[in-house]
Amino acid sequence: MLHYVAKRLLFTIPVLIGISLLLFFMLRMLPGDPAQVLAGQMATPEEIQTIRQQLGLDRPIHIQYASFLGRLARLDLGLSARTQNPVIQEIWARLPNTILLAMTAISLACLFGIPAGILSAVRPYSWIDYIVTIAALFGISMPVFWLGLMLVVVFSVILKWLPAGGTGGWQHVILPSITLASFVVAFIARMTRATMLEALSQDYTTTARSKGLTEKTIIIKHALRNALIPIITVVGLQFGLLLGGAVLTETVFAWPGLGRLIVDSILARDYSMIQGTILIFGLLYTLVNLAVDLIYAFVDPRIRYD
Amino acid sequence: MSSQTKPLLSITDLKTCFHTLDGVVNAVDDIQFDVYPGETLGLVGESGCGKSVTALSVLRLLRCPPAEITGKICFENRNLLELNSEEMRNIRGKDISMIFQEPMTSLNPVLTIGEQIAEAARNHKRMTRQEAWRWAVEMLRMVQIPGPNTRARDYPHRLSGGMRQRAVIAMALSCNPKLIMADEPTTALDVTIQAQIMNLMVHLKEEFKTAIVLITHNLGIIAEMASRVIVMYAGKIVEEAPIQELFKDPRHPYTKGLLGSIPVIGRKDKTGRYLQEIPGIVPSPLDMPVGCRFNPRCPKVMDRCKKEEPPMVRQGEHRRVLCWLEA
């Protein structure tokens, strides 16, 4: 097991190099000149040239990439062209916020999505199933920014129960995580319903019933454990997406996370910052996938890594 | 099995139908039979004749709806169809248990063998975790699984088909039930393993004094194990007879056909073929023939058979035939 984990961790290195390679060259294909953006509208060609030299953008692209990799090996992601702070420092400042929000959202989604899916699978085509289905449809089709704004209107503006944005206490996390969880909860509920329906129709469920076990034992111990594998996959993938893709929610709630950082950096053509943030996303995503694979082995004894 | 002994299970007018989009399917149509304590009753017939549905109806393991079970299933003088779900749960696994056809799919892949045996015991015998586990290991020893201590900790995918079926049998026996419904317990296994499992069941039946309803299409297994046989065709019981009499003197044309279709080395029929068959196919449950359900395939069909349903003709305590020829 440890051997497997070590191997998988080593594998993340070529993955990250691949990401950096793609990223590095794609970034430079974007229209717009970072030196121009930094220097401003009124800058002379000489000033722009100086900035270009400072950023090392005048050198051939493969040399730029090599020096980027060299610095990366020393965990140095460079300076942000926009703020002149070390990229790693900016990321560190925002990473906890992003992780907090993603964790809260995914926990909320599991907490409500899985039981809702189980309920509708246990009583398919009952009123409870229809309610869950309709709610899921809303959750999946509601635009995130609109839901976020509506929550702000109701809970911050009208009721004045919760803050409309920013960070601080636990109250600040509630609205953005609900907004972020709405899609995921619906997705998880539908997935749980489908896999639970399948598990409940399997022979081993009939066997369990023939032993005189209680419905609760049959559902939780026999069916759910078998239904969990696809659910874990979905939760893992969604968690990975939440880590990287909360841009809209972060914008609506002025939440200082990585999503907004990356959008701001792209607008400013801040190459170092974009590279750094996306590499961190890549790293987080591969780690989440590794965690998912390890949880598989824990849930399903047929999966073993040795 | 004289009339003095009270039957353990007494089924009367049992009808099980399924409400489907195409119409109502009468999978089991008005059958009656008794099972006596400690006996082995064979239930034979082709696929789709209602054997398995009968077993599932007794334990009420069919989802209702779409299924609908009517009639009386009396177990120790209690009509199982009138029990609430809690009372029914106390009978399942404890008084009546079931052995399923496919040991590959009937065991839960994510739970250890020991746990799957122990949970029934824990549930019905009020055992603690440790007691139930020791009991599960003991059961595995009973069904002759080598190294039961380590095997109990194994998951189903680590066991061979034969071993898995032994584990399923251990599970069915774990609460010492009075009746086991064994639904094709050896069909999914290869022939040598089949013989081992059958021997094991004969041996355990003696030891536990359990009655078995053995559901199969394999007449060889019936001949070896059962003391009495019920033959089903298209949801109806067509013949019942003690085992010796059935093989010596089958009366229903369908039973004759079934027995005739067992190939005997060196024996040819009138047309010079080694394997005799029953012509035609089993009728669709949505479109049953009028009169006797076997009439389109029967070699001795008469006019009456195509118009009126045949009567059940009793010919002794455990001898009956559903046929106009015997009326």
Image (cartoon, coloured by chain):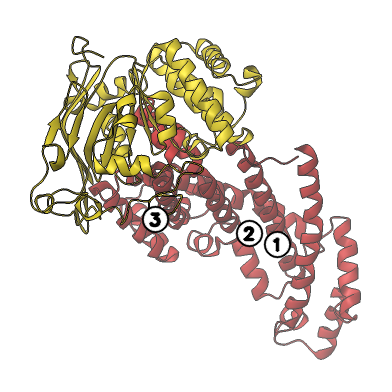
- The answer to whether residue A203 of the structure is visible from this angle is yes
Classify 10 Å Cα crowding around label 1: few (below 14), some (14-19), many (20 and above).
Answer: many
Image x and y of residue B122, in percent: 44, 16
Q: Nearer the viewer, residue B48 or A110?
A: B48
Residue at position x 66%, y 55% in the image: A285
Question: Which amino acid is tagged 3?
Answer: Thr
Mark 2 and mark 1 residues within 8 Å of each other at the beta carbon: yes
Q: Which residue is mark 3?
A: B271
Query: Which chain is mark 1 on?
Result: A
Q: Which residue is mark 1?
A: A277
Question: Which amino acid is tagged 1?
Answer: Thr
User: Reading the chain from its start, which is encountered first: label 2 or label 1?
Assistant: 2
Q: Nearer the viewer, residue A48 or A128?
A: A128
Name the mark nearer the viewer: 3 or 2.
3
Q: Which residue is mark 2?
A: A258
Query: Which chain is mark 3 on?
Result: B
Image x and y of residue B69, in percent: 19, 37
Q: Secondary structure at mark 3?
A: loop
Q: Which chain is yellow?
A: B
Name the mark nearer the viewer: 3 or 1.
3
